[in-house]
């Protein structure tokens, strides 16, 4: 569906390609060690262009979220109410995702586990609360 697919230009292309191969990857600066998402041409901490890629181990925690009661895009109309969350990977980078749990069960700092899903034909990183 046009208008909802990811922008694959620039370094983001490698991010989406890795997801299609089953891995959530993030950038690690070879100069200062900072980890970051989304992918960029330079380190957001020290501006070095020397960036490598690492695969996320899958552990994360919930930083914040909102619940959409009106769809951001008409393509999401059948998903409301849905959450849009800020998730922090155990390695440090944060990303925007969805939590696979009832909206009313979400809690700040909740431990999460990466679970790859699919949205409009694109593999996407989703997260599910860790039981217990
Ligand atoms: Zn750096």
Image (cartoon, rainbow, N blue to C red):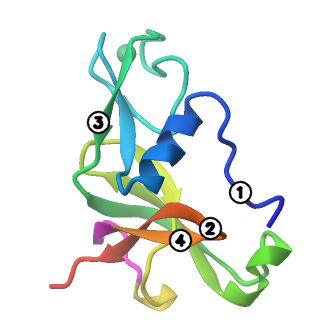
Mark 2 sits on what residue?
Answer: 121
Residue identifier under label 3: 54
User: 10 Å neighbourhood of mark 2: few (<14), some, or many (≥20)?
Assistant: few
Q: Is residue 18 above or below residue 75?
A: above
Q: Secondary structure at mark 3?
A: strand
- Image: magenta residue range: 106-114
Q: Are marks 2 and 4 in contact (CB under 8 Å)?
A: yes
Q: Residue at x 38, y 38 (%)?
A: 26
Q: CA distance from mark 1 to mark 2?
A: 9 Å
**Which residue is pictured at 29% across the width and 59% down the height?**
60
Closer to the chain start, of discs 4 and 1, is: 1
Location of residue 116 by image quarter: bottom left
Q: Residues within 10 Å of mark 1 (few under 14, many from 20)?
A: few
SS category of the residue bearing label 1: loop
Which residue extends farthest front? 21
Q: Does the stretch in magenta take in 107?
A: yes
Quickly name the residue at label 1.
Answer: 5
User: Horizontal and vertical percent for residue 78?
Assistant: 73, 89
């Amino acid at each position: 569906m046009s208008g909802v697919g990811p922008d694959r230009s620039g370094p983001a292309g490698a991010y989406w390609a890795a997801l299609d191969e089953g891995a959530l990857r993030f950038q690690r600066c070879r100069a200062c060690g900072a980890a970051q998402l989304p992918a960029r041409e330079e380190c957001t901490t020290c501006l070095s262009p020397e960036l490598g890629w690492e695969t996320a181990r899958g552990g994360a925690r919930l930083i914040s979220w909102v619940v959409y009661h009106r769809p951001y895009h008409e393509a999401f109309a059948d998903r409301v109410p849905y959450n849009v969350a800020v998730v922090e990977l155990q390695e440090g980078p944060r990303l925007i995702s969805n939590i696979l749990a009832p909206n009313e069960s979400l809690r700040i700092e909740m431990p999460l586990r990466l679970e790859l899903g699919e949205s409009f034909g694109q593999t996407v990183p989703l997260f599910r609360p860790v039981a217990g």
